[in-house]
Image (cartoon, rainbow, N blue to C red):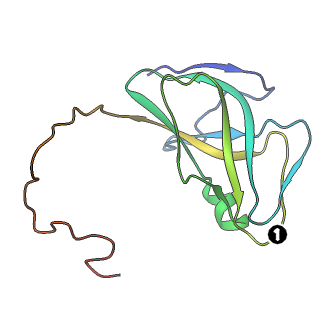
Amino acid sequence: MKVKIVKNNPFNLPAFETKGSAGVDLQAYVQEPVTLKPMERMLVPTGIFIEIPEGYEAQVRARSGLAIKHGISLVNGIGTIDSDYRGEIKVILINLGDKDFTINNGDRIAQMVFIKHERPEFELVEELGDTVRGAGGFGHTGE
């Protein structure tokens, strides 16, 4: 799969850090450092634009190191970038920690993973087939 990219930032192209990496890091493209106060959220630009092939999506995910060390996460959990989106990739960060967190130009703020997906055809029916689980959910098998 090839992903076309336009970048307005001075950074290298996104790259896989290790042979087994599933995602590439996204870097903040900010003119000056910005500070996220506890429980504050912010849309952080990356300076990149991508063209994803049809049948794929890009998922923007939190970086585990920022999450455990500083409480930095994504407001929407995982952000989806659809194949027909052509705008700048931006990351919706939130500071769930108890201290201010400063984002500098070039900081790795999230990761992006590419996923193949299907487009289902929905079929309206009167009822669904039975399973052992049935409608049980939300902790029905224990905590």
List x then y, in percent, for residue 78.
Answer: 53, 49
Nearest the eye: 111 or 139 = 139
Nearest the eye: 124 or 119 = 124
Residue drawn at x 48%, y 44% is 20
Q: In the current view of this chain or complex, which residue is farthest to the front?
A: 126
Q: In the current view of this chain or complex, which residue is farthest to the bottom?
A: 142
List x then y, in percent, for residue 80.
Answer: 51, 39
List x then y, in percent, for residue 26.
Answer: 67, 39
Q: In the current view of this chain or complex, which residue is farthest to the right?
A: 32
Q: Which quarter of the image is occupied by the N terminus? A: top left
Residue picked out by circle 1: 99
Compared to residue 115, the image places residue 75 above or below, namely below
* Figure quadrant of residue 137: bottom left
Residue drawn at x 21%, y 36% is 122
Residue 72 shown left or right of residue 124 in the figure: right
Number of numbered callouts drawn: 1
Q: Residues within 10 Å of mark 1 (few under 14, many from 20)?
A: few
* Figure quadrant of residue 28: top right
Residue drawn at x 80%, y 39% is 106
* Figure quadrant of residue 88: top right
Residue 81 shown left or right of residue 69 in the figure: left
Kind of residue sitting beneath label 1: Lys
List x then y, in percent, for residue 83.
Answer: 48, 25
Q: Which quarter of the image is occupied by the C terminus? A: bottom left
Compared to residue 106, the image places residue 97 above or below, namely below
The secondary structure type at the circle numbered 1 is loop
